[in-house]
Amino acid sequence: MGGAGANRAAKDMAGRVQCVEATGYDHPALAAAAPYDLILANILKGPLVDLAPDTARHLAPGGHVILSGLLNDQAAEVTAAYEAEGISRDRILIKIASTWEGIKAAEELEKEGIHCNLTLLFAFAQAVACAEAGVQLISPFVGRIYDWFKKENNTDYVGDEDPGVQSVAKIYSYYKKHGYKTEVMGASFRNTGQITSLAGCDLLTISPGLLEELQNTEGTLVRKLNPAGTCDLEKISYDEKAFRFEFNEDAMATEKTAQGIRAFSADIVKLEKLVAEMI
C-alpha cells in the first residue's frame, strides 16, 4: 500500500481516496462498497485473469472494466477470461500505449470488438494513426505537454495559449472535420484553466481536487470545442516509416512517451517482485 499511499499524497488526494491492501477483493471495505459501476485494474496478465471471477461478482449490472498493464499480445486472452465470467467485451476497455506497435495491436483488437484506450499520447502523428486504426478512445496528456514546454521555454502558459490545450483542440477539430469516430479524452490536467479551455471535448478525466475547484467557481462556462468548428487540416495517413519520422521529429512527444514507458516498466518490475514475495 506504500506506493498507492505515496501516489495519493503526491496528488493531494488525502481524504478523497481510500487505500487498502488486500489479496484480490478480500477486504471488508471493498465488499461493503460493492457493486461497482467501474473497476480499473493496472496489473499483470496472470493476476488479471485470476481476478476475473471476483471482478464479475463485484461489478454492477451494466458496469464497465478498464484493464491496463498488458503487453500488446495479451489483451485477447484476458478479455476471453472476463467474457467467460459474463462480462461482455463491449463492457471492457483495454489501455495501451500509443507506440506504433501499440496502435497496430489496438487496430486488430478493435476488429474483434475489443475496445481500446490509447494512452501516452503526445504527438499529432499518434492521434492520426489512432484514428486511422479505428480505436475507441485516445487520452492526450494535456498537463504533461504543458510541463515540458513550461520547462523548455521557461514560460507559464495560460488558457488557449497552453501547448497542451492547443494539442487537444487540434486533434478534436481534425477528428470532427474528417468524420473519425475515435473519442478524444483530455487527461492529466494541471489547472482549471486547461479544463475550461477544452469545454466541449468528447470526454475529460478530471481529478477530484480540480472538480471541487470548478464546482466552487461561479460564472458561465463557454463551450470552446464544437463538432461544427473550423479546421483547415487536410486528411493525413501514415505508414510505419512516415509515422516514425513524424513522431521522432517531435522532441516533446518522444521524450514524454519514453519517460512514460520507462515508468510503466519500473512499476511492472515492482509488481512482479511484490507478487513473488506473496507466493
Image (cartoon, helix red, strand yellow):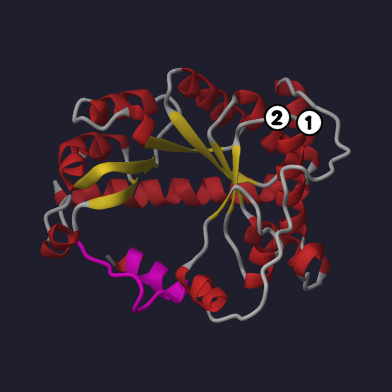
Instruction: Residue at 54% x, 72% y: name it.
Output: 210
**Along the line of sight, the residue nearer the viewer: 124 or 115:** 115
Determine the residue positioned at 65% across, 54% down: 200
Task: List the residue tagged with mark 1.
Answer: 245
* Secondary-structure class at tag 1: helix
Judge the density around disc 2: few (<14), some (14-19), many (≥20) Cα neighbours within 10 Å.
few
Separation of residues labelled 2 and 1 (CA atoms): 25 Å
Q: Is 59 a magenta residue?
A: no
Q: Which mark is residue 72?
A: none
Q: Which residues are magenta?
A: 4-21
Camera sees residue 52? yes
Give the answer, above or below, for where 4 lies relative to 262.
below
State left or right for residue 90 relative to residue 253: left
Location of the N terminus by quadrant is bottom left
Q: Is residue 13 magenta?
A: yes
* Magenta stretch, main secondary structure class: loop
Q: How many marks?
A: 2
Left or right of 144, for residue 19:
left
Q: Position of residue 158 (x, y in %)?
A: 77, 71
In the rendered structure, the answer to whether residue 206 lies left or right of residue 165 reads left
Where is 194 relative to 266, above or below? below
Q: Position of residue 134 (x, y in %)?
A: 59, 26
Disc nearer the start of the sequence (2/1): 2
| Residue 236 placement: quadrant | top right
In front: mark 2 or mark 1? 2
Q: Along the horizontal axis of the image, is 55 left or right of 15?
A: left
The kind of residue tagged 1 is Phe
State the SS at label 2: loop
At x 72% / y 37%, what residue is drawn?
Answer: 176
> Which residue carries the number 2 mark?
179
